[in-house]
Amino acid sequence: MMNLTKIHPLTYIIYYLLLIVLAFMFNNPYYIATFIICISILLVLQGVKSEFKGIIQLFIPFAIIIALLNPITCKEGITRIYLFGSYFITVEALVYGILMSLSFLLVILTFTAYNNSVTYQDMLYVFSKKFPNISMIIVMALRFIPLLNTRISETRKISKLSHHEDYTFIEQIKQFAQNIGVVVSFSLEEAMVTAKSMKSRGYNVAERTSYLIYKFRTLDIILLTIIVVCLIISIIGFANGYGSITIYPSINFSFSNLPLNIYYLAFVVLLLPLIYLELREKIQWH
C-alpha cells in the first residue's frame, strides 16, 4: 500500500460517515444506482469479491421481505394494485419499500468498504485516548455485520454438509432461522470471552498508548477539501429538491429526467476519491 496508507484514519472515518448519511438522505433512483455502482467498484478494487457476493446473497431475501412488507402494512398512495377481491397494495408503497431496501444495502456495502480501509487499531488510535469505552463499542459495532456475514456463510456450509439439500421452502426458512440462532449464540459467547480477556489485561486502567503514528498530510487536506466542497454542493442541491423524490401521495419521478446538473456531478465526484486512489495504486504496483 502506498497512497492509501498515508491517509489519516480520521479522514477515512469522516468520509465513510458522510457516505452513510448520504445513503439515507438521497432516494432518487439515479443517485442510488450511482452510489451502488461506485461502492461496488471500490469493494472489487479492495479485493473482496467473495465477501461482496456473500453480502448480495444474504441481502436478497431481506430486500424482498422489506420491499413486500411495506406495501402490505402501508396503504398510502393513489395508484392501487388489486391482488384479490378488495385487497390492494399501492405502487407508491412498493417503490418506497424497494428504495428503503436499497438504502439498507448501501449502508451494508459502505460498512464493508470501511472495514477494509480502517482497521480496529486505527479506530482505537483516533478515539481511545479520550473515549476508550465508546471507541471499543464503535469498533465492535462496525465489525458486527461483516463478522456475522462471515459466520453465517460458514454455518450454511456446515449445514449443507450435514443435511440434505432438497428442503421445502418452509424447511429452508426453519434451517435459516436455526443458523441465525447458532451464529448469535456463538457471537455472544465470544463477546463474553473477549470482555473477560480485556478486563484481565487491564484495558482502560491507564491511558492507552499506540504504536501507530499518523500525521495529517497534504493528501488528507486535499481529500477533505474535495469532500467538503462536494458535500456542500450536494446538500444545496438536496435542499432545492435535487437527489430526492416525493413518493407519497404520488411519485414525482420519471426516468427521462436525467440528473445532468452540477449537484449530481458533485455527488459523483464525492464518491470517486478512494476509487481513484485504489486504481492508481494498482497501476503503480502492476
Image (cartoon, rainbow, N blue to C red):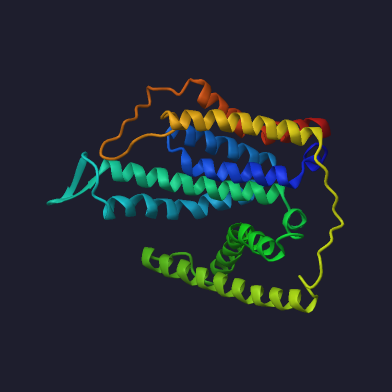
Q: Residue at x 49, y 20 (%)?
A: 261
Q: Is residue 47 visible?
A: no
Q: Is residue 201 above or below residue 16?
A: below
* In the foreground, 204 or 197: 204
Q: Position of residue 194 (x, y in %)?
A: 70, 73
State the residue in front, 65 or 124.
Answer: 124
The spot of residue 88 in percent (x, y) is 19, 49
Instruction: Tell me which residue sits at (74%, 77%) in the image.
Output: 199
Q: Residue at x 59, y 62 (%)?
A: 148
User: Which image quarter: residue 7?
Assistant: top right
For the view shown, which residue lies furthest in the left direction? 85
| Depth check, front residue: 269 or 238 | 238
Left or right: residue 55 compared with residue 125 = left
233 sits to left or right of 238:
right
Instruction: Pinpoint residue 99: horizontal percent, then vertical percent.
Output: 41, 43
Q: How many marks?
A: 0
Q: Quadrant of the C terminus?
A: top right
| Quarter of the figure that contains the N terminus | top right
Q: Is residue 129 left or right of residue 243?
A: right
- The answer to whether residue 280 is seen in the rendering is yes
Relative side of 226 to 78, left or right: right
Tell which residue pokes out farthest to the front in this image: 130
Residue 109 image offset from top left, x and y in percent: 57, 47
283 above or below 69? above
Q: Quadrant of residue 253?
A: top left
